[in-house]
Amino acid sequence: MKKLALITLATVLVGAIASSPAISQEADPAPKDERFGVRVGIGTDLSGGIAYGFGLNYLIPAATNYAELGVVFFGGTFKETTEEGIHVYEETTDVVIIAMSANLLINYAPRSGNAYFIAGVGLGSISAEWEETSSTDGSLGTPLPGGGSKDSDDGSGGGFLFNLGVGKTFSSPLDLRLEIPIMISFAAPGEASSVIPLFSLTAGFRF
């Protein structure tokens, strides 16, 4: 149900962008009392795991575009099932991220109804818990009741965040974004992937 809602909202956003007016070449200055913003959103990865996010940001005019500085908090649970011979393995990775971010908003114009593009980077702390279980393979480590075994690890460290996306403003302080944030951990625990690409849909409000 969550994946269906995300796909539906993404379809609406893409359709709205496709039908939006031509993007202006000069962004109108944002009202001084609307430089601060808050964002909330939901995302998924290639395995279908669900992530949730929250962020605070500040808008800075930069020539005909805008820069956006902020802090983001998000986390999620990602699962993967693999088969090797007669054994089936299930991996679960829980991730929590706190990062400082900087986005360039290309052709962004507040309250204009235009489409715009996002490119950004971030640096922060990534905390992860990894677990692999198998009901048939007893060689992973800790025995499981009823047979099989599990292996687990956890850790935290620094990481990079890269972000690309598209968005659409409205005639109000509200805007929507469809983004692809990519997390790269410096120290992924166990056999967890150090690179996690996400597909996210977020809503923002300026005040």
Image: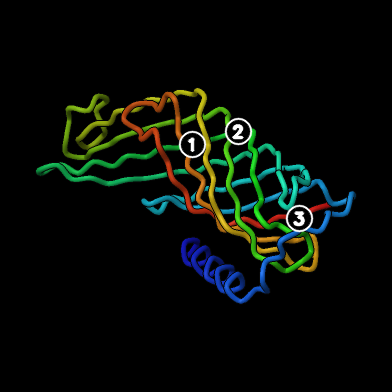
Residue 144: name its quadrant. top left
Residue sticking out furthest to the bottom: 19
Q: Is residue 59 above or below residue 14?
A: above
**Residue at the spot of label 2:** 98
Q: Give x and y (percent) for residue 203.
A: 67, 57
Q: Amino acid at mark 1?
A: Val
Look at discs 1 and 2 and give the one toward the viewer.
Answer: 2
Q: Are marks 1 and 2 in contact (CB under 8 Å)?
A: no
At 76% from the left edge and 48% from the top edge, which residue is drawn? 37
At 77% from the left edge and 59% from the top edge, which residue is drawn? 110
Disc 3 to disc 2, how far (Cα)?
20 Å
From the viewer's side, name the closer residue of 155 and 152. 155
At 54% from the left edge and 41% from the top edge, which residue is drawn? 75
Q: Amino acid at mark 3?
A: Phe
Mark drawn on residue 110: none
Q: Give x and y (percent) for residue 138.
A: 17, 30
Residue 186 horizontal side relative to residue 29, left or right: left
Mark drawn on residue 205: 3
Residue 4 horizontal side relative to residue 13, left or right: left
**Residue at the spot of label 1:** 95
